[in-house]
Image: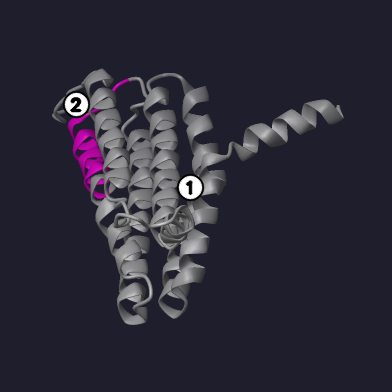
Amino acid sequence: MADNKPAMIRHRKNRLEAFSDGVFAIAITLLVLEIGVPLVEDGIGSGEVLRRLGEEWPVYLAYFVSFMTIGAVWIEHSALVDALDHIDGAFMRLNLVLLLFAAFLPFPTRMMSEWDGNLPAERVAVVVYGIVLLIMTAMLLVLGRHAEREGLFGDDLADERKEEARVKYQLTPSLIAYAVAAVLGFLSPRLGISLYLLIAIYLAIPLRDIRKLFGKRAA
């Protein structure tokens, strides 16, 4: 019996890579544009200028956390796309959802920095921030599962197994951690922000490669 299933339209991934890299770069650039310069009057001393700069530490912290987070998502996204042989239309649309939230991240980042000190507003900002991070991580998982299900890795099973291992050891724990951090962030915003930072650092550091390096040295 003939198979009437329509053939999947294969797309090259180079344009998706270029577009995605551009969105990630713009999102990171927008973060630094949100950092305002403190007002300095004529005749003010250097010590007072430094004090006012120091008072802006919540802004710097929010910027650093968001920078590390977008950077970590970009690293994971790059590893996934590099392992693909080709992409399909569904992958392109799912990728747009990921980029939607990546480009949106500067907004909750500004909320956290500007609402620092107002506990009810700060709680809302930290939770919204966590939800955005949670969705970004979930979309990476969705993209990986879709690529595996539709055979986008091609005939190279090594790349597919490598991607499965990366998802298992990196993304899945961070997905759970973001959910926990968002809940704790409602109770204690500073604790939530600290956990977001730790998760971003965890994603950015190649833990499996470090384990392999120490394993080789021990051998």
**Residue drawn 19% across the image and 26% down it:** 8
Residue lying furthest front: 43
Circle nearer the viewer, 2 or 1? 1
Dominant secondary structure (helix, strand or loop) of the stretch shown in magenta: helix
Write down the quadrant of residue 56 in the picture: bottom left
Tell me the quarter of the image containing the N terminus. Answer: top left
The magenta-colored residue range is 86-101
Judge whether residue 87 is colored magenta: yes
On residue 8, the disc is 2
Residue type, label 1? Leu
Measuring from the top left, give residue 13's x and y in whole percent: 27, 21
The mark nearer the N terminus, 2 or 1, is 2
Q: Report the Cα–Cα distance between label 2 and label 1.
A: 28 Å
Q: In the shown orientation, is residue 164 left or right of residue 129?
A: right
Residue identifier under label 1: 171
Total labels drawn: 2
What residue is drawn where x is 56% and y is 47%?
202
Seen in the picture, residue 33 relative to 52 is either above or below; the reply is above
User: 208 or 72, which is in the foreground?
Assistant: 72
